[in-house]
Amino acid sequence: MMNRREFMTMAAALGAAFGVTNLPEPVAAALKQIDPQTIPKLLYLQGQSCSGCSISLLQAQSPSPLTLITKYSQLAFHADLSATSGSQAMNLIERYIAGDAGPYILVLEGAIPEKMPSACVIGDKSLASLLESAAQTMAAAVAIGACACDGGIPGAEGNLTGAIGLPEFFSQRKINKSVIQIRGCSVHPDWVWQTVVHLVKIGMPKLNEIGSPKLFFSRTIHETCPRYHDFQQEIFAAKLGDSGCLFQLGCLGPQTKADCSSRWWNGGQTWCINAGAPCIGCASPLFARQKNMPFYRMKKRKA
Amino acid sequence: MKIELGPLSRIEGHLNVKTTITDNVVVDAQCVGEMFRGFEVILRGRDPLDAQQITQRICGVCPYAHAIASSYAQENAYGITPPANGRILHNLIQGANHLYDYLLQFYQLSALDFIDITAIVNYKGSDRELVQVKDWVKAELASKKAFPGAPFLPRLEGQYVKNDEINIGALKHYLEAMEIQKKGNRAAAIFGGKFPHATGIFPGGCAQNPTIDHISAYQSLIEEVRDFIHQKYIPDLLAVAQAFPEYWHIGQSRGGFMSFGLLPFNPGRDSKRLFASGVLLDDKIRAVDFDRITEDVKYSRYSSASGLKVNEGELTPAPDKNEAYTWVKAPRYDGQMVEVGPAARVMVDYLQGNNKQVTDLVDRFAGIAGISAKELNSVLGRHLCRAICAVVIADFLLNETEKIDPGAPAALELEIPASGEGFGATEASRGALLHYIRLQDHKIEKYECVVPTTWNCSPRDDNGNPGAMESALIGTKVANPAVQIESVRIVHSFDPCLACAVH
């Protein structure tokens, strides 16, 4: 956990970055001391990732992605969106990480191949070496998605590269920095953007035992599921397309804390269980971890 | 002179291109995939029904293509055919994903190579969004920040469109495309559950029986996307082509072309598809035979054997292997290098006269641009073929929705054999995608993926022949060797996805 002073500095910086006004004291007081020329930028790096979290962030509905990257945030670099490329881009990244381009918030999507540094390289630097340097200069760190938080699928059983998440990476390197952890494979865009807004407006969000904001990750999918009544009445779906609780098909809602059932996905269009699909536990730190823990139990086996 | 173009931005993932320049010409190019995860090993020993979920995480840009290829492969291994509704929903999910991906590729990933976004400071109109961007750019440029205007500035030195009206119009559509792409994804999510990474796709169909409210919502969203394609995307593409006609002749790959065919009309495995499959080698179309695909690894960072067929594939990483320069393998068809992707998809279909709409669109646009069908093998050709695919797919999807039997089942009750094997082939937005699954004792014994960018960003094969993108870069004239905006435009025209290429 960061201390109060670190938090105030970061909250103030984030407030300026996101252009939020009407801040409660004492956040507003701290904010006034910040020079707008030097507010932290989001330096978004990708590790062993699929870009799914980045693509999900572009699905943000309110505010829209455009507003988020021009009005609410200052995006120093993102490999999928930046006009710059090559040595010009590398120079930008390295100047931030050296502490020469002003304060920045490190945002990581993807895992880190701790046992095989050449399995993730940006320019001529391994991701691991960039992160180790960034830890000395960053204002804060946010891990986005299953991979950056826990290793995700690259870190699942059979992992050839020693893929781990950012908290574990810092811990192994004895770097004492806190990491805000937003799980999900992919993340829901609100979980990321609204965490930052929460930080600024109200202060540090309460985190659960695995470092994720309780606002989004406090209750299990099962507890808040619209099919919970079916579960209580023991009305279970026996096959895909059936109504009823999906538990017997393998639903991992009981083991997964996230607010999908009330938030819904893709601008509130739908979500997994509304589309008849059992939860596969993508917001759980144990997501896809073990080979002998299948997602589904629906199938009949032929001899 | 040796110049590295990495880290390449506005693509998916970690790509470097090592170039050698003599007299302002690229005389050598090596595509370097810089990230490795090892999916095929992670899949071994898992429950087979995990596969369409795990493989979606290969790529968060085109996850549905992987879910569909995996479902096809599992259907083949289980010996099942989905009900009509199930296959239609597969198509509706996959097709909508293509539409979003083409818009993202043109506006967010490629447009900034051509469009001069600094033209916004000359904007005199009153459009709210454009005024917002203009004010923001002006404030940024007036600031003392180390990198004002990020992520839109800095940018590479080069010639951009000079006409302010075109620049500002395209910028407005860049912003609109960010909204429209979401609608394509919302449409897919209706049946897939969410985007990215759908939970609703299964071998044998989809998790929910479609009802009339789903269908009408889907239609409405796709109609909006289709309007944008016709009214904004195609005119913008033609404006870029008019400003840079030389790019009809820049970036030709020097091998064959291959497409696995896209969007079946019927549930059966051998159904005719909206886009035909085929391999174009030596100006002749042949039927695709998966047995003729092999993967070389002499220049790839693996110690496993080279030249293996897909169903024999192996994966032993060797990060320090001598001569190896990339994590990407070198797939070959009958030993030949082929390009995959939108240009291959359109050419393979066009030359077989499979789809009259494709033929008509190619002839019409080739007439407008003053090119022959062969010049689809170029930077602008690839961009044009994406737009042609977008038009054809949007119409197809709306037709498909009329074929749904509302309320009828969309999935089979699955019975999974202890052993078996299957291939699943489709077209991701970036090209030909192949999955192979083999089961033993109800578990995955082997899983192999040969993915579009594996073909396009392939390194040299064991005979020293370059991959498609390498061959397209070699011979390119560059104004400024240190920057090479010409090479960057070639790379972007392939729309590389390195998470897919290596996986």
Image: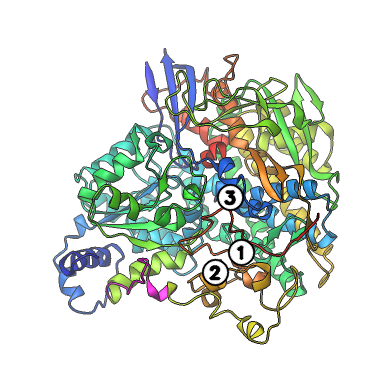
Which disc, if any, is residue B186? 1
Quarter containing the C terminus of chain A: bottom right
Q: Chain of mark 2?
A: A
Q: Secondary structure at mark 1?
A: helix
User: What span is colored magenta in the figure?
Assistant: A203-216
> Quick one: label 2, few (<14), some, or many (20+) residues within 10 Å?
some
Residue A42 appears in the rendering: yes
> How far apart in space, not on screen, are marks 2 and 1 (Cα)?
7 Å
Q: Chain of mark 1?
A: B
Q: Which residue is rendered at x = 61% and y = 38% of the image?
A: B383
Q: Which residue is rendered at x = 86% and y = 50% of the image?
A: B268
Q: Are marks 2 and 1 on the same chain?
A: no
| Residue assigned mark 2 | A267
**In the image, which is nearer the foreground, mark 2 or mark 3?**
2
Q: Is residue B36 left or right of residue B235?
A: left
| Residue assigned mark 3 | B103
